[in-house]
Amino acid sequence: MSKVSISLARTPFQLFNCIEAIKEFNRKGSNIVICIYKNEVDRKLFNEILKEYLWTKIYFFKLDTINKLFFPFILNKILKRYEKIEFCFFGLITSYIVHSINQINAKNNILIDDGNETFLIANNIKNNKYKDKFRNSLGNKILGINLSLDFIIELKIFTFFNLDSYFLNNVILKNNFNNFKESIDTLPEEKEIFFIGSNLIDSYISKQYFENIIKNVIEYYSDYKITYIPHRYEDLEYLLKISEKFNFKIKKFSTILELAILQYGRKPHGLISIRSTALETIGYLYDIDFLNIIQIDTEMLLKKEQVLEYKNLYKNYKQKNISLIDIT
């Protein structure tokens, strides 16, 4: 009898990592996925990534007002169709995910990566922060919501990142992307830099400061062709407007960059970003020559509490030997 897995994917990158986990742990089994999304941007990306694997069954769950209110009933209707689940893969810990994990009751619960979210979850587990966030109140019991956190005790973490500093009691399973790397042939390299976008405008930095960064980046890397890869939530119309102003190229892929480079058929010489964990994974997957983080002036951040966040980010990048480039 084949083993069964259920993947709970909240972001496109989580889905990518769920596929890697399935190929690592349940390649010959039956594999079901529930794609959880808020907008059509994510759904389109999900649809592209879903083509990378032959699924037993695919479900979509949209986080609109009605579905968020009645999520236990809607998700239970799906999950009750399956029993004796061997693996549950997920990359986020929220009320609807926790409830689903408890309903699935898998033999193995495995956390997969979702960029910085992996570190936030590790920190929350280390400091036991989830106990205050999720409580089985009387109201939840009436609604049939099960927010038990017992699964965290035996939770396994399938990750590309080094989590040693968190001193977790959980089993850490190293994700070297062995299965995906098998599909990558040697790609030709161009004298091009991919500038990986981040959704920072108006939340972390102003448009004016962002444009100043773009101008300085183009001058600093004048020996290379610069191609800006927008974050899925960035304003493409605005980016196209400033690309004409500063004379750089915008490339919007139909899938996540981890897959897009393979479809593109060639790799860039370098990757740069203001902040993105994709820098590390893509650099590793495609053996990119150099990875740079564009260091911003923390005094230009829009909120005071963001200064410490960025100082910690830069400390983390330095520990990983990722160069910080001051372009001011």
Image (cartoon, rainbow, N blue to C red):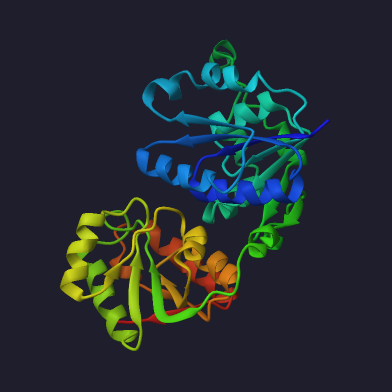
163 or 187, which lies in front?
Answer: 187
Asked if residue 162 can be seen in this view, the reply is no
Instruction: Name the residue at 20% across, 58% down.
Output: 238
**Vertical relation: 286 (above or below) 152:** below
Asked if residue 31 can be seen in this view, the reply is yes
Instruction: Name the residue at 39% across, 20% down.
Output: 66
**Vertical relation: 140 (above or below) 235:** above
Quadrant location of the C terminus in the rendered image? bottom left
Q: Quadrant of residue 286?
A: bottom right
149 or 132, which lies in front?
Answer: 149
Q: In which quarter of the image is residue 200?
A: bottom left
**Residue 89: image location, x then y, percent:** 66, 41
**Residue 262: image location, x then y, percent:** 51, 64
Total number of numbered labels? 0
* Residue furthest to the right: 1
| In-image side of 310 versus 110 (left or right) | left
* Residue furthest to the top: 142
Instruction: Name the residue at 50% across, 68% down.
Output: 279
| In-image side of 66 versus 288 (left or right) | left
Quadrant location of the N terminus in the rendered image? top right
**Vertical relation: 199 (above or below) 192:** above
**Residue 29: image location, x then y, percent:** 75, 38
**Residue 308: image location, x then y, percent:** 44, 63
